[in-house]
Amino acid sequence: MNLMVKRNGGFTLIELLLVIAIIGILSAIGLVSFAASLNRGRDAQRKSDISNLVKALEQFRGDWGVYPDAGTNNEIMGCMQLPNDVNFSACPDSGKFHYFRNLEDIVLLSSYPVDPSVNRFYRYEHTAATGSNDEGFALYAALENTNDKDTKKDINGVSTDWGVSCGLNGASTPLCNYKVTESGLTIK
């Protein structure tokens, strides 16, 4: 009597479960890496947008000697009338940041940057030192990668935020953790 059973060339249930488990683990690792790549890509776009805004603000100040005002929702207003210049107006409208001088349309940004996430915006503050003619600005964004080297750090080097919201429509979150001023990147 032969106790050996001849196999007909299939896989056992254990073998199939093992292969499915390995594929599941590899898929999970791939999805986490993919999500992190998307976050880094959106953060790179935010930094590029802020850099372009800084260049436009500096050009605006070079032309007019002042930075544009901030609107009630902390956006770049630019809609202001300079003394003794009836032909001047500047607004980030129609999807671009531009101003008119003597009826000439001067475009600073052909398309006004918008945060790549739907629930965030770039916060702008026009600053002025009390009792001084010195003025400046601060542009904020909320980076998704809180371990990014350019996010705000506390005294222990741990990532934190600036205590102001970069959320749309008055939302208290997300808080801004990336800041650029007229002096450059600020992390402390």
Image (cartoon, rainbow, N blue to C red):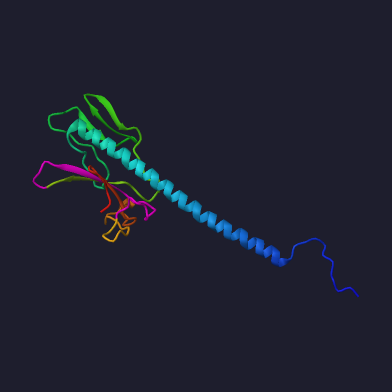
Residue 130 horizontal/vertical position (percent): 11, 48
Whether 95 is drawn above or below 170: the answer is above
Residue at left offset 31%, top offset 46% = 122
Q: Residue 155 sits in which quadrant?
A: bottom left
Residue at left offset 82%, top offset 62% = 8
Residue at left offset 70%, top offset 67% = 14
Whether 52 is drawn above or below 17: the answer is above
Q: Is residue 169 magenta?
A: no
Quarter of the image where the N terminus is located: bottom right
View extreme (left): residue? 131
Question: Which residue occupies the foreground of this view, 58 or 68?
Answer: 58
Residue 168 horizontal/vertical position (percent): 33, 51
Residue 36 horizontal/vertical position (percent): 46, 53
Is 152 left or right of 31, judged from the image as shown? left
Is 23 left or right of 77, judged from the image as shown? right
Is 133 left or right of 155, judged from the image as shown? left
Whether 154 is drawn above or below 185: the answer is below
Magenta region, residue range: 130-152
Q: Main secondary structure of the magenta part?
A: loop
Question: Which residue occupies the foreground of this view, 66 or 167?
Answer: 66
Whether 185 is drawn above or below 96: the answer is below
Question: Which residue occupies the foreground of this view, 24 or 118?
Answer: 24
Quarter of the image where the C terminus is located: bottom left
